[in-house]
Amino acid sequence: MRRNNLLQNLHPVTLLCLCVCILAVTVFVPHPVLTLLSLCGATLLCFAEHGFAATAKQYLFYIPTVALIAVINPIFAHDGATPLLFIADLPYTLEAMISGCEIGITIAATLAWCKAFEPLMTSDKLVFLFGRILPKSSLVIASVLRYIPKLKRTLASTKQAQIMLGCYKGDGDLRSASTVYSSLIARSLENSIVTSDSMACRGYGLKDRSVYAIYHFKSSDGMTVLCTIALFVLTLCMSGEYSFYPDFVIGCNIYGAVSFALLALMPCIVILKEALVWRLYLSRI
């Protein structure tokens, strides 16, 4: 992430509500227009959070995935009124290809939203949200989310230490690689034991354990939650009719599309508002 923004200062409940509402529409309302709007919103947020290069790198995976699902889906789904060709006397239809494309875009949008919310929904926020309800599960989820980034940092530091000691002969050397990875596994096991003992000593999971929270639910959080729920309900009620089989028919309700567009762009609107306010303050100096 380039720098801290207003999204990071939102209450964890606000971020969770925003994330759940957007992902719920993306996954459970397979409307092509809403799916494309969701992908656009996720892409813009990824660009704001991670930069253009990292976002473009993600699309090197998303585009082939969408194309692959669009090509494979008609092999298994033979419904549709527009056959393009026949494979073993089974129709390969245009409608099934469009449906596969929509499924692929849904998967890409979901992955993009998860990538965009990754630096926002940190491990401490997850523990704050679910620590009292599901203490063990929340600790496991928080540990898993921070495991891969921490593992990469540990791998880099271990490799650098081996290089400085003159023991690392290169990525192609099997003995050097095995030494680094054995050290990495040992450090990971040691860290897991230390984390477990540390949380047990702090009384984590006990019923009467008090919790210090640095997060405070402000009026801006309440307004954001109300707007999110209102846009979510409007999107569900006015999403419009759609059908892939037997003919591809799409009916777009402009109010539903605008509602979800505002919902999907809300994180970017918050970042844009912060940037404009910051520039305004700078101009007054």
Image: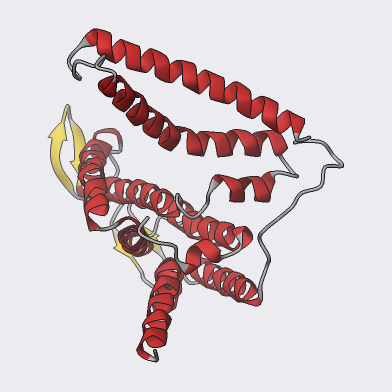
Q: Nearer the viewer, residue 45 or 99?
A: 45
Q: Nearer the viewer, residue 56 or 125?
A: 125
Q: Quadrant of the C terminus?
A: bottom left
Q: Going 51% across and 55% down the picture, which residue do you hit?
A: 24
Q: Nearer the viewer, residue 32 or 228?
A: 228
- What residue occupies the far top of the structure in this picture? 175
User: Residue 19 placed where, x, y %?
Assistant: 51, 57
Judge left or right: residue 5 versus residue 13: left
Can residue 97 be seen here?
A: no
- What residue occupies the far left of the structure in this picture? 85
The image quarter containing residue 77 is top left
The image quarter containing residue 45 is bottom left
Vertical placement of 161 versus 12: above or below? above
User: Residue 283 placed where, x, y %?
Assistant: 35, 89
User: Residue 264 placed where, x, y %?
Assistant: 42, 66
Q: Going 53% across and 19% down the picture, which residue do you hit?
A: 189
Judge left or right: residue 145 versus residue 39: right
Q: Going 23% across and 9% down the picture, which residue do you hit?
A: 174
Vertical placement of 65 versus 114: above or below? above
Can residue 176 be seen here?
A: yes
Q: How many marks?
A: 0
- What residue occupies the far bottom of the structure in this picture? 284
Give the colour scheme shown.
secondary structure
- What residue occupies the far front of the structure in this picture? 165
Vertical placement of 12 versus 122: above or below? below
Q: Quadrant of the N terminus?
A: bottom left
Judge left or right: residue 171 versus residue 285: left
The image quarter containing residue 197 is top right
Q: Nearer the viewer, residue 31 or 276?
A: 276
User: Residue 256 placed where, x, y %?
Assistant: 44, 73
